[in-house]
Image (cartoon, rainbow, N blue to C red):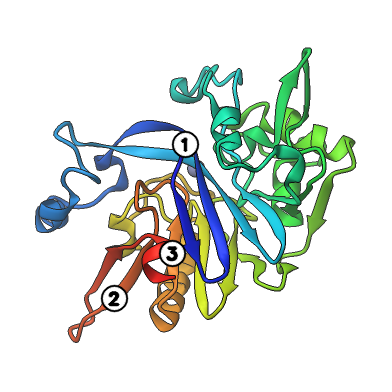
Amino acid sequence: MGNTLSFGDAEIFQVPETSWKMPVAMFGASDAQLERHRHWLQPTYLDAHGEWDNIVQSWVLVVDGRVIVVDPCTGNGRHFPDYPPAHMLDTPYIERFAATGIRPEQVDYVFCTHLHMDHCGWNTQLVDGRYVPTFPNAKYVMVQREFERWDPRRAGHVAVSANAGTFENSVLPVLEAGLAQIVPDTFRISASLDVAPAWGHTAGHSLLHLDSAAHEAYFVGDAFHHPLELLYPELDAGTCEDFSATLATRRRLIETCLASDALLVPAHFPCPFGVTLQRDAQGELSFTPCAADQSG
Ligand SMILES: [Zn+2]
């Protein structure tokens, strides 16, 4: 069972799938930057082996009388030989989802920040050899710009081997079942929830903004992977399709969250998952790990 948070008038459930060890060196911080922050990076964000646990998790939001699943993880039995940590997973994600007390049939919306394999896999599951929608009564909200980026049927499609099969297994079956809701760059799901651009990591990478009872949170997917990128948004791990767009997105999100004291929830941060940002008189950024129920 994952964590449960309350935020404004929203209930938020974490559904963990797995975690992947990643070398912190991949984020490109200098030795001086690492030394400066080592005291708080260790052990959560930097372990004794120079790695950290990149958490793969979904958020289930209950707000406005609706149930919304954000970023349904990787899925079981998926073939990713180029990326062993995601290859042929066999996790009890469905059982963990059930532990929230919400049944998949009760989900009204599924929102994928982007269509990488670790953000849309449980859109579907294998049943009798066929991929079928996991949430049979949901509208699956996907931004058109992102949907088109990954549609291999389009002229000029640029394939990414690490993401091979994701569109066919996790997106097309939803489309064919009539459950896909392809939306423009900005889209309101309900009174408290709207979708907005957070481009860069992928062409149509987007965020979900929760504004409930004067509390704001931004579920920002992979705009940030590691906390060092909050302090040094110019760090480029080489995992973005358009890093200049990522940098603009990061800077905009940092300023937005500073101005509104909003909770920022990157996809892969460990417990307590969200952060609030602060800037001191010298202009230096810092952040506070902050679970939603502490601010709500
Ligand atoms: Zn990711």
The label nearer to you, 2 versus 1, is 1
Amino acid type indicated by mark 2: Gln
Residue 241 x, y percent position in the rendering: 54, 49
Q: Looking at the rendering, which quadrant does residue 278 occupy?
A: bottom left
Residue named by callout 1: 1
Amino acid type indicated by mark 1: Met
* Above or below for 207 versus 35: below
Circle nearer the N terminus (1, 3): 1
- Taking depth in this image into account, of 61 and 41 the one nearest to the observer is 61
Residue 48 x, y percent position in the rendering: 14, 34
Q: CA distance from mark 3 to mark 2?
A: 12 Å
* Mark sitting on residue 264: 3
Amino acid type indicated by mark 3: Leu
* Mark sitting on residue 278: 2
Q: Left of 18 or right of it: where is 138?
A: right
* Mark sitting on residue 228: none
Circle nearer the N terminus (3, 2): 3
* Above or below for 178 versus 278: above
The local crowd at label 2, few if under 14, some if 14 to 19, many if 20 or more residues have their Cα within 10 Å, is some
Q: Residue furthest front?
A: 101
